Amino acid sequence: MRAGISELAGRLRNREISSVELTRAYIDAIEKLNPTLNAYVHLTFDTALEAAEQADRMLAEGDAPVLCGIPMALKDNICTDGLPTTCCSKILTGFKPYYDATVWEKLKRQGAVLLGKTNMDEFAMGSTSETSFYGAPLNPRNPEYVTGGSSGGSAAAVCANLAVYSLGSDTGGSIRQPASFCGVVGLKPTYGAVSRYGLIAYGSSLDQIGPLTSSVRDAAIVFDAIKGVDKRDQTSVDFDYGPSLVESLDRDIAGMRIGVAEEFFDGINPEIEASIGKAIALLEKNGARIENIRIPALKIALPVYYIIACAEASSNLGRYDGIRYGYRTPSYTSIDEMIVKTRSEGFGDEVKRRIMLGTYVLSSGYYDAYYKKACLIREEIIREFDAVFEKCDVLVAPTAPNTAFPLNYKGASPVEIYLSDICTVPVNIAGVPAISVPCGEDSRGLPIGMQIIGRKFDEATVLQAAHFYEQAAGKVIGDYKGGAAI
Amino acid sequence: MKYEIVCGIETHIELATRTKIFCGCTTEFGGEPNTHCCPVCTGQPGSLPILNQKVVEYAIKAGLALNCKINTKSHMDRKNYVYPDLPKAYQISQYDEPLCEKGYIELDSGKRIGITRIHIEEDAGKLVHEKGFTFIDYNRSGVPLIEIVSEPDISSAEEAKEYAEKLQLIMRYIGISDCKMQEGSMRCDVNLSLRKPGDPNFGVRTEIKNINSLTFIQKAVMAEAERQADILDAGGTVVQQTMRYDEKTNSVAPMRDKESSEDYRYFPDPDVLRFCIDDAKVEEIRASLPELPFDKLKRYVNELGLSDATARQISRYRKVAEFFEGALAEGAGVKNAANLIVGTIFSNMNTEEEKELFDIRISPAQFAALVKLADDKKINIGVAQATLQKMLESGKPVEEFIKPEDLVGISDGELERLCREAIEANPRAVADVRSGKDKAINVMFGYIMRKTGGKADIRKAEALLRKLIGQ
């Protein structure tokens, strides 16, 4: 059993191990495994060791925060002052922001040790991490398979124990789906719970930063550390979560009302359906009340997601023109040509596809039929979730309709890959929190994830249910062999 | 003219808030290029806008001063277009829910020019072409603007100028912008078409961009109306296009065509929350507005009895009007106060800016002390003017220049004695007056003034003299 944050925090405080030693162990593991797994795209070992020394001083002084000295990783779309932040896109080649994302500022202040920036789909657009300019990360559980995406590197790094925890971002499932493919825990917080300042935008009304961890307890610890209102993000919300989400984890789930919506199970791989069914039975056996409910609007959530996310992306990505930062085409004769060539050469196909889709749905003449209609349906989806949460405390669903795809899965058209987001996108559209926890393996030994969805700002109940399940179910997937030896 | 002008004006005004619309950077004009910048106003990846509440307040002020309805629910939209001075490739603006709607400006003729809408938005940076390179200065990027769109109610070049002038005056008065057209803190785009009188349909319009002075607005409207009339007279059709006014040649010519019909793909900005302004806030802002220049003008003429010309000069500048009203509150008489401001204080101020700033060294109370001496005839107007000039130069109060013994004035008995003396001393002049050469009375005024050091009340003296001469 690998060590979680609490255990490591204890060992750091006992002087059993120093942060520098811990960091070196992770660096060694990364040096050994990353050339194959490609989980990290930018390594920051020098600053990591400096941070570890600093953390050891903080620990020696006593009263250090729980995350002090713990080695971790950030998705490559989270801004880090002076360190590469490229969204795994050619167009941001060499970009080093001169400011920190709020989440990183918070973690840094607590003594976090950043090992590097993790691989991802270019601009977080994808479900396999294969659209990365740096090549796909491999699924540590079986390197023939993808990690999922877009936070594939963050999931792989935690899975292979190349980081104690990592942060990802989730616009339509980009934390939860790779967490499920790699057999780790991934939490997408309520929209507005975590500041987006410094998260390079994809779909601004959907994007949220959240943790990927090896346990629900760790997810609660990290979420606790990064949440909170931020005066630099108007969409962040000042919600009072009470003193600690970690302390409420151990509550019993007897009497908890768990909703199961049949729409989430449409077209799901039978092995996954069976695995989730088993998990639901376990929860019921432990006193949860299962409510069968309907959320009809889920059936149209996928097109709504792709319209809204692409529309926002087409606008958000307009700024990459080669003028101020990042890649610039080497030869041009006019500024217009420079912008066109920079963008043509700098963006990959999937990003171009979504920019074109987004531009199309916002164009005059099509706006009402696509973007405006999508916004109206979004309201309906929100209403249906609100209604469901009158009757239920949480919903349980698969995280994805399938386990990990094989690498370079040729059969997949873009639409087939888009369909794999079907269980996760409604959560972003509604702005509610959800977690993915491992709940089994398919016949090929690939992990299956269960999704637990909650009310807005009710991460406490989501985490509590997930933690209860995790404890009650025990070992549901095999251990990963390798990673940091500690 | 056989055509009727149909003209509307879009005005961009930079708001005089201390900081930019979405970040804490200063809005100060000038500064080394790219020194008033941060990740937000240069559109760095990951940065997010925070709406400056002062901008909303200032725009509401503008709306209320222009008789607009304030939309208490509003939001920001993204206007997407690509240009190097626009670092995010979209401008955060307002599309279908402008902050203010349906107002008007009243011209001197009583005609009202409708205000369609006022919305808030961010300014772009500035391209600087030098030594064969193009540089970008983002200091101006994110400076708050309001765009004021008029109805096409303007039907002459004079009305166009008056509309812009009044707008400028009001915006300065309520203190939300300095509206300096040369510095670009007020910029006008004029839309213009012609039609036959009585024709209910509009003709094809052109837009003249970025006119930078009030006079040029008038000239550009005339030039463009003539140009369009020539085309129509020749049986041609006006092409809808964007024009530029060239002040050197006093002519209007098409601008280099950027992109013919741009689709801005407006949509609500997901980074800026919808905002609500409660009615109490609107009322609070309304209560904070000063009396507007045209209301002051009317009051000065109708209630204070000032001439239209004098009332105009005083009401035109908020600080002058406040100084004037401050002096009245201290007991100064209306006429003397007004005349001394316009005659003496303004003679020290050569430019509009100086009058606008009205940076003088004496207080309204000090000014009133002087005016009251003139009101009470303790000094005559010439002495008052000379003394005021000395006060303005030194910043010292009136007591420094007029000794108590100077203020004793001339008693009625003394004045009568002096009049008799003057008549006796000037028999020739008396005879001239009697024979109808009225100007000869000045000889006796001169005598009395010499004797009194200018302190005699000349009107009283005149009445006495005429009585004594027997007229």
Image: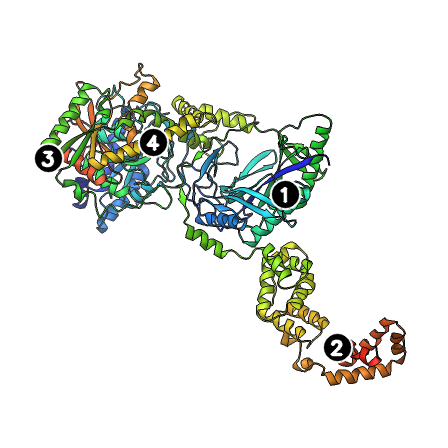
Tell me the SS state at disc 1: loop
Type of amino acid at the residue the image marks with label 3: Gly
Q: How is the image coloured?
A: rainbow
Q: Which residue type carries mark 4?
A: Arg
- Provide the residue designation for mark 4: A378
Q: Which residue is mark 3?
A: A287
Mark 3 element type: loop
Q: CA distance from mark 3 to mark 1?
A: 75 Å
Left or right: B328 as drawn, with respect to B287: right
According to the picture, the residue beneath numbered tag 2 turns out to be: B460
Q: Position of residue A182 (x, y in %)?
A: 23, 26
Give residue A134's quadrant in the image. Answer: top left
Chain of the residue under the numbered disc 3 shown in the image: A
| Type of amino acid under label 2 | Lys
Image-based side of B70 in relation to A432, left or right: right
Callout 4: residue from which chain? A
Q: Are marks 3 and 1 in contact (CB under 8 Å)?
A: no
**Residue at image x 59%, y 64%?**
B325
Q: Amino acid at mark 1?
A: Asn
Mark 1 or mark 2, which has the lower sequence index?
1
Residue carrying label 1: B212
Q: Report the residue that reaches farthest toward the left.
A: A285
Q: Residue furthest top?
A: A411
Residue A319 vs residue B50, the one in the foreground:
B50
10 Å crowding of disc 3: few (<14), some (14-19), many (20+): some
Image quadrant holding the N terminus of chain B, namely top right
Disc 4 with disc 3 on a shared chain:
yes
The label on residue A486 is none
Return the residue nearer the eye: B353 or B38.
B353
